Image (spheres, grey):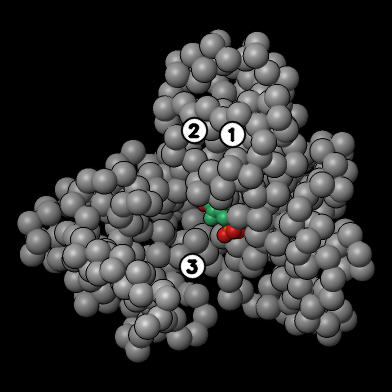
Amino acid sequence: MAKTQFLDKKIEGLKEEGVYRKLPVLEGANEAEVVLNGEKVINLSSNNYLGFANHPRLKKAAIEAVEKYGVGAGAVRTIIGNMDIHEELEEVLAKFKREEAVMVFQSGFNCNAGTIQAVTEKGDLIISDELNHASIIDGVKLSKADKAIYKHSDMKDLERVLKEKRDNYNNVLIITDGVFSMDGDIAKLPEIVELAEKYSAMTYVDDAHGSGVLGESGRGTVDHFGLHGRVDFSIGTLSKAIGVIGGYVATSKSAQEWLNHRGRPILFSTALPPAAVGAIIEAVNMLMETTEYTDKLWDNAKYFKEKLGKLGFDTGHSETPITPVIIGNESKSMEFSKKLKENGVFVSAIVFPTVPKGTGRVRCMVTAGHSKEQLDRAVAAFEKVGKEMDII
Ligand SMILES: *Cc1c(COP(=O)(O)O)cnc(C)c1O
């Protein structure tokens, strides 16, 4: 008998709760309209905000990088995997982010896992928003510092924690998502920064959903609020709006140098492949050339959100292109998503444990790559299924 049989019981449990699923299979590139498990659908589920994942300019840059550097970096950066394009990428990103220095990681997840533990130690305190991303939670777990949680975006609660605990610790690090990925709300960064300055704490913003979306040409939440130089660690992902793979932290030169020595994913995991690095440099240059990509994204998101709102859907309190449609019940959310797919729209259901119990939803991700005609077709499917299921 297989020793993993205990897992079958757990999987049975998922089936009983109605949250069991198979991985969807995408046939071809991640585009606004895709073939998924053999069916053509409008894609409202990707993080490909700017349509860069299959952009001709990025593909060309990737191919050129492969021709020059090959397909793999061949080693971790601290041994012999640090190519001149990795250095160039960090320079380009620092310029784009208008910060002193950037350290690139293999993913946003890795960046959180590696950075948080490297910049905190025993005797320090990490204060984290209760809705922070899983990779922050894991990063915090890897740290030897003490931990405290504050209620989501509740500045009174954050100040309560600071008041109660600040004096018992050496360094204090306040961590927040820049944009909260399940609701699309933006962190109250100006207030967080003020509290941090008042209580001499450091600030850490994970801007995975703000990079390429908020601020001038997608420079992120720090730029959106004009807080350059006042946030100590500004994390971005290169896998969402930038369309490729990777993560980075924009920070001081000293923190960058420290991560070079103590960031475990830098020391123990191979550097990003040249194709990815070449494509990312091109993407960042494109954003520095023009705001046309981010303008199109916001225009499409506003258009879609207004139409769903008029139909009577509960789109929550999003301030970004992330558009949740809140259903509540977990299995009803799954059912809604399934029916939408039958009607040519792929929008994945997001349920517990990714969001709190009873707040199941489908989360629509509108991108710069959608045409108005595609968005209209998606809205028509929402209306039809929403009426059939008594949601509107
Ligand atoms: C997606 C996401 C990450 C992980 O980024 P990857 O580059 O996909 O590993 C980290 N933090 C937040 C807030 C995210 O939404």
Residue 68 left/right relative to 28: right
Q: Quadrant of ligand 1?
A: bottom right
Neighbours of disc 2 within 10 Å: few (<14), some (14-19), many (20+):
many
Front one among 302 and 188: 188
Q: Are marks 2 and 1 in contact (CB under 8 Å)?
A: yes
Q: Is mark 2 within 8 Å of ligand 1?
A: no
In percent of width and height, residue 93 lies at 77, 52
Q: Decide which of tag 2 and tag 3 comes sooner along the chain.
A: 2
Residue occupying the far bottom of the picture: 38
Amino acid type, callout 2: Asp
Neighbours of disc 1 within 10 Å: few (<14), some (14-19), many (20+):
many
Residue 340 visible in the snapshot:
no
Residue assigned mark 2: 129
Of the numbered discs in the image, which one, if any, rests on residue 175?
1
Of the numbered discs in the image, which one, if any, rests on residue 369?
3
Q: Decide which of tag 2 and tag 1 comes sooner along the chain.
A: 2
Q: Decide which of tag 3 and tag 1 comes sooner along the chain.
A: 1
